[in-house]
Image: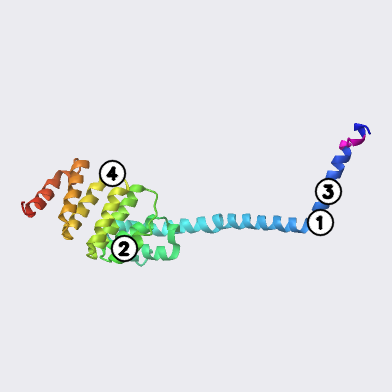
Amino acid sequence: MTNKNHQHDPEQSVEQALNNTEHFIERYKKPLIYSAIIILLIVGAGFAYQHLYRKPLIQEALAQSFTAEQHFRADSFALALNGDGNALGFKQIIDEYGSNAGEAIYLYAGISELQLGNYQNAIDYLKKYKGDDLVMQARAICNIGDAYAGLQNYKEAASQYMKAAKHVDNPFAAGYLLKAGIMYEELGDTAKALEVYDEIKIKYPQTIEGFEIDKYIAKIKQSVPQQ
């Protein structure tokens, strides 16, 4: 038998492939059509959600928060939080729009509650803040510490201040460490307080806290009985 008998005609191969494809399409025509329709519906729904619902909602939320931010900058924290009768406050904006108003809305609301002495509410809002800026994240953690200090939970306050100081290396960390040291003093842990004050003296000598830290160190050393 010659090799010629085993060779396939290319045209026959192409024709066979086309026939197989036609049979496949004919057999699975309805499922294929349904799948295509479902994909189109999903893509269309996603587009509609983003452009017809989410984007307008974000714009509306940002517009609502403008006046509240103005009150916040003027230290009118009650108006910023609860609204002024004409514009919504941060609390209502969060209830209505959530994070569509931007992550900073939780920071604004938390600080407002903190300034008004509503410490647990402040903690609840500040813990929801998920901004990308590491310095602002550290500030939010420090504010959580402030709220715990207001609740006289000095142990948790010190923990939050230390967490804020270690979150990102920046000059504000000296202030967080100083607050932590004061909390340790309130807890009677003068050794830990002294350790924190020494860290300020070594790492942040050019900050305001660094310039004044010697008096905190001296106060502890004077209060500790000499061996």
Q: Which residue is mark 1?
A: 27
Q: Which residue is mark 3?
A: 20
Residue 186, quarter of picture: bottom left
> Does the magenta portion include 106?
no
Label 4, label 1: how far apart the Cα atoms are: 67 Å
Decide: marks 1, 2 in contact (CB < 8 A)?
no
> Does the magenta portion include 8?
yes
Label 4, label 2: how far apart the Cα atoms are: 24 Å
The x and y percentages for residue 169 are 29, 44
Scheme of colours in the image: rainbow
- Which portion, as a residue range, is magenta? 5-10
| Labels 4, 1: front one | 1
The x and y percentages for residue 202 are 19, 41
Quarter of the image that includes the N terminus: top right
Reading the chain from its start, which is encountered first: label 1 or label 3?
3
Reading the chain from its start, which is encountered first: label 3 or label 4?
3
As shown in the figure, which amino acid type bears the numbered disc 4? Answer: Asn
Give the residue displayed 80% in from the left and 52% down from the top. Answer: 24
Give the residue displayed 31% in from the left and 58% down from the top. Answer: 72
Give the residue displayed 29% in from the left and 52% down from the top. Answer: 164
Decide: marks 1, 3 in contact (CB < 8 A)?
no
Label 1, label 3: how far apart the Cα atoms are: 10 Å
As shown in the figure, which amino acid type bears the numbered disc 2? Answer: Ala
Q: Answer above or below: position of 65 versus 197.
A: below
Q: Which residue is mark 2?
A: 122
